[in-house]
Image (cartoon, grey):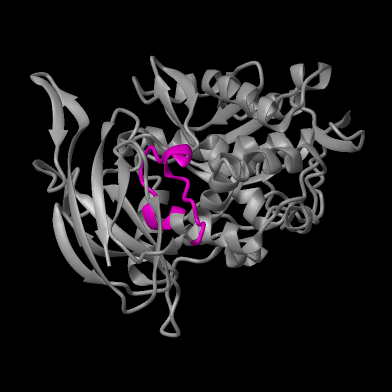
Amino acid sequence: MAAPSFAPSRFPRPCWGLLVVLVIGAWGEAAEEVATQPVVAAARRAGLRVLEGRHLILITDRPVRADDGVGNLPQIFDEAFAVWCDHFQVDGPTVNSWRAVGCLMVDRQPFQAAGLLPTDGTIPPFQNGFCDRNRFWLIDHPNPAYRRHLLLHEGVHACSLTLRDLSTPTWYTEGIAELLATHRLRAGRFESTPIPLQASDVEQLGRIEKILLLRRSGDVPGLEEVLATPPDRHHALASYAASWAAVAMLSGHPAYAKTFRDLEAGPLDANLTQRLEQAPGWNAEQAARDFDAFTAEVDYGYDFLASAVDWSPGKPLVAASQMTVAADRGWQNSGWSLRQGDRLAVVADGRCRVGAVAEGPIETEPEGISLAWYRGRPVGRLLVAQWFPATSGGGRPQWKILAEGSRGKCVAVADGPVYCKINESPGALADNTGTLSVILSP
C-alpha cells in the first residue's frame, strides 16, 4: 500500500488570485487563510460538486453514488474538528468560524482547468494528498474507510497549521495527523480511536501491520531514530507508521502523557523535540525502552495502562520465590533478577478468565486454551521472559520467551529481571479476571 504524501507546506505561499484573510492563531501570531467564497465560486462555475459542512467545504469531481460515504464527509469532518480543537487546546470565535476547503479528485485535470489546483510549481507533486494552510487536495480512494482517513489526516494539518501555526519536526507533524485522523464510525458518527480498536475499522491503513513487519525483519526504528526523521523521509509508509507509534506512546503511556500534553500546550515549532528531551523527568533511555516494548507488542486496541512495564532491576533470585500474575496486565516484573546463564525452574497453577462466549466465561490454566491462539501460542498460556537488549548483529531490543506453561526449565539470556504474563492480545486484557500463581526457583 502506497504511503500518503501528506506534509504541511514549507514551500513559498502560492498566489491564488484570491482574497487572503488573516486570523489570529492561538499564540497571537497571524496565520494566513485563503478565503473560501472565491474557491467555491470557481468550483461551481466548473460544474464540480460542492458539499458543505460547518467547517469543511468539499469539492469533488466524483459522481454521485449511493452509499459511498462521500456525502457524509463534511459532517464527519465537523465531528472530528471538535476533537482536534480539544486536543490542540484552542477555542473561541476564530475556531467557530474556521473553515477549510478540500478537493477530492478523481482526475486532477478539471481542478487544474478551474484554477483550483496550481500547476506553476507552488504546490509540489504529491501521490495521495497535500495541505497548504486551510486548503488541501487528495486523490480519491476506492475504500471509504481509507478515503475518510486521508481526508481527516489532511484536515488535521489544515487545523494545526492555521490555528496553532504548526511548524514542528516531521515525526510530530505526521504522527499527530495520523493519530488524530485514526477513527471508526459508530452509528455513522466519528469516534476517535488513536489506537485502532480492530482492523475492520481502519481498512487498508496498515500502520500496525507495518510496525509488526518491521519488527520481524529487524528494521523497526528506535525512538531516537524516529525523533530525528528528516523531512524527505515522511513519504514512506514505515515513517508514517513509526511517527504514529511515537506520538501514540507519548500521548497514551502513563509515564509520558502529562509531559506530552504540557509540551503540546506550548509552541508547536521546530524546537519541539529539544523541549521534549529537556522536559522535567524525561529519561531518554527509559523512553527508548518503552517505545521498543510498545512496538514489540503493538496490536489493535493496545492498552497502555495495562501494558506499562516496570523496569526496576529486581533482587537476585537465590531461593524459590512466588509471584502472582494478573490476567488483565501485560508483562509483569517478578521482582527477581537473573544473571545471563543462570538456570531457572518454573512451576505455575491457578485459573483465570480470558473472556466469554454465549455459553459462559472462558477460563484458562497455565497451559492455555486450545480454542483460541495468539501469536502462535494458546491464549491464556503462562509466558516467562526477559528483556533482551540489542546485539551487535542489529535489531531492536525485544522480549525473549524463556519458558511457558505450567512447568519448565530454562536458562537466562541476559542480566535482568524475570517477567511473566498470560498470552493474550494487549487489546483484549480489559475483560480478563483472576490470577496465576508462579513459583520461580534458581
Looking at the image, residue 259 sits to the left or right of residue 145; the answer is right
Q: Quarter of the image containing the C terminus?
A: bottom left
Q: Tell me where residue 355 appears, x and y as whole percent.
A: 21, 29
Residue 129 in view (yes/no): no
Question: Against 347, is 65 above or below?
Answer: above
Q: Which residue lies furthest to the front in this view?
A: 319
Residue 107 in view (yes/no): yes
Residue in front for this viewpoint, 274 or 390? 390
Q: Which residue is drawn at 44% across and 72% down?
A: 389
Q: Tell me where residue 193 appears, x and y as whole percent.
A: 47, 32
Q: Which residue is drawn at 79% across and 41% down?
A: 16
Q: Which residue lies furthest to the bottom in this view?
A: 392
Q: Quarter of the image containing the N terminus?
A: bottom left
Name which quarter of the figure residue 273 lies in: bottom right
Question: Against 312, is 107 above or below?
Answer: above
**Secondary structure mainly formed by the magenta segment:** loop
> Count the marks: how many?
0
Task: Please check the rendered image and state whether residue 296 is part of the magenta-colored stretch, yes or no.
Answer: yes
Residue in front for this viewpoint, 110 or 134? 134
Residue in front for this viewpoint, 231 or 255? 255
| Span shown in magenta | 294-313
Task: Please check the rendered image and state whether residue 297 is part of the magenta-colored stretch, yes or no.
Answer: yes
Q: Residue at x 51, y 57 (%)?
A: 312
Q: Which residue is drawn at 78% across and 33% down?
A: 163
Q: Tell me where residue 68 appears, x and y as whole percent.
A: 37, 26
Residue in front for this viewpoint, 94 or 439? 439
Name which quarter of the figure residue 359 lies in: top left
Q: Tell me where residue 338 appears, x and y as whole percent.
A: 38, 69
